[in-house]
Image: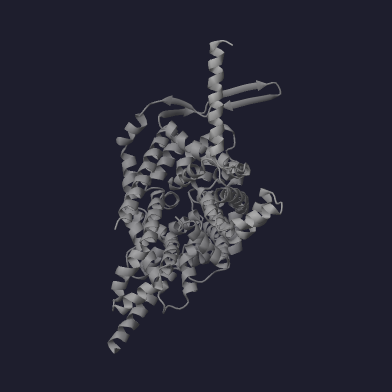
Amino acid sequence: MREHRRKDAVWRFLTYAFILVMAVAMLVPLYWMLVAATLPQDEFLNLTPRFYPGTAFLENFASLQDRTDFVRSIWNSVFIAGVYTVLSVLLCSMAGFAFAKYEFRFKEPIFYLILGTLVLPIQLLVIPLFLMMAQIEWTDTFRAIILPWLANPIGIFLMRQNMKSIPDALLESARMDGATEFQIFYRIALPAMRSSLAALAIILFLFQWDLFLYPLVILESEANYTIPVALAGLEGTQRIYYDQIMVATTLAIVPLAILFLVLQKQFVSGILAGSLKE
Amino acid sequence: MTPATATRRRLWDRFRFARQGLSDRLPRLPSVAYLFISPFFVLFGLFLLFPILYTVYLSFFEYQGVSFDSLLWIDLGPILIDVPRVAELEFVGLGNYARILNDGLFWDAMYNTTYILAIQVPIMIGLALALALALNASFVRFKGVFRTAIALPVSANIVAYSTIFLLLFNEFGLINSLLVALGLEEIQWFRSAFWARNTIIAAVTWRWTGYNMIILLAGLQNIPQQLYEAAEIDGASRWQKFRYVTVPQLKPVLLFVVVLSTIGTFKLFAEPYVITGGGPSNATITIVQYIYKEAFDSWNLGYASALTVVFVTIVSAISIVQVRIGGED
């Protein structure tokens, strides 16, 4: 019995040690980034690592802002991802509602066609989309970034699954009361789906926020750069300004990380919603 | 009435009858359903289906540049509809595909991607599974805190975290400083193919382990507790419970995570683009990066499209094989 208990204790210790090591490994790069963002460039290049923050964050930020209008890039990213999320959630939930609650011709084949495109990597689309945008002279515009991804297969799939849980009797009684189909969607379906809509919004926001290859191809002028494109442009010239890069990465990561901490539940259900229900 | 008109009339009647029969057989369609799906479907067709077909089409051509000829030109007085031709192309048949076979750099990129995949995915899934199991153990406290800490990288912007890894593994980066502090040799991470690849593997693992852990954790929590209780009554050891209860129950979720991660790592672009730039001497160039280079550095859009078609075919084939293997018992 005592032997058993000792083995148990060792097991528990090892489990804790593993979790702790992993948690630290995940946090160290982020913490180091925060510290580095507050150090003057010469101190950053000291070979002895330093683990407590300095005071140069604002100076570093000023020199970053001097070199490239990073605040503008943040605004671009927030604007693009925000508009995209609202429109796409609306579009996907409308279509999902139709697929869940109405009968129409070719419903099943259309739905499976949409599902099938989930497997394809989105990089497939970059070349033809670039050519299309070049032809209608939409390159270097936000609409070229937002429009192509609005009809998101994951979104319609998720909304169809969730809209199915709305009882038909509820919709029927609304119809009896003389509600139009659009009112039913707007007044009954959408409010009932609030938590799935939040989860979908998070998936879509993150998707657009992280998009890199496509904006890299489409955007030309620096004033239109999104955060990833602006970040990628920061290094590369002869000299690397570590202080500026660290401030920029901090600004790119910290707001979302805070959002993650606050909306943890929605975040997690958002990730799961996009994955588990296959 | 001439015989010809009579025949036509009969045919027309039959056609109308067939149509009527068809519409009687179908359930009543609320036309509002079409209103709900049409915006989605217009965008879906325009920006997803058309580009996919267009890629396949482009792959048989050599791109010569943008053309200013009109494909469609309708003059209605005040309204002028002018649809420009999408691109000036020269038909080369299967030429692009033949070129792929002898393209050393494509096979290098293929090899690099497969190499990173073969090492990164097992390590990451192993870590994610171990973490999910650990955080699912009944005795562990502060689960929420640990889960949050480990999943935090999920919120990191892809280019931003790649930049952090670039600086972490730089010549004067934190990693080298620590190595020196421990009395070890500095490593030129980006000058050797081996270390450059491992840096990318470390970065991708850092970002996605927590993500996979969350999915696996949800899978674990869906396993009925009675199964474990029954196993315990039968005197099953910890390992036996894992082997005979957890693994079979978790299999669908595990399979899903593996397929998703495989596709994800196959599509690798931002990390090598930012961290190693594909170097040293193309040792870390990935397929998507190579396609990007061909398309937007060299403007070989036709050839890049052929590469894309081959790439997508391979990714889909691998996913199907994984599902087949994982699906049988």
- The colour scheme used to paint the residues is one colour
Q: Nearer the viewer, residue A98 or B80?
A: A98
Figure check: B232 above or below A123: below
Residue A221 appears in view: no
Count of numbered circles on the image: 0
Q: Position of residue A182 (x, y in %)?
A: 67, 49
Q: Quick one: which residue is furthest to the bottom in this view? A: A2
In front of the other: A7 or A134: A7
Q: Nearer the viewer, residue A236 or B212?
A: B212
Q: Quadrant of residue B105?
A: top left
Please say whether residue B65 is visible from this viewpoint: yes
Dividing the picture into quadrants, the one containing residue B251 is: bottom left
Q: Residue at x 55, y 31 (%)?
A: B19
- Point out residue A178 in the picture as x, y percentages from the top left corner: 71, 51
The quarter of the image holding the N terminus of chain A is bottom left
Residue A39: give x, y in percent of width and height.
53, 65
Q: Nearer the viewer, residue B124 or B257?
A: B257
Q: Position of residue B324 (x, y in %)?
A: 32, 51
**Residue B219, placed above or below residue A114:** below
Quarter that holds the C terminus of chain A: bottom left
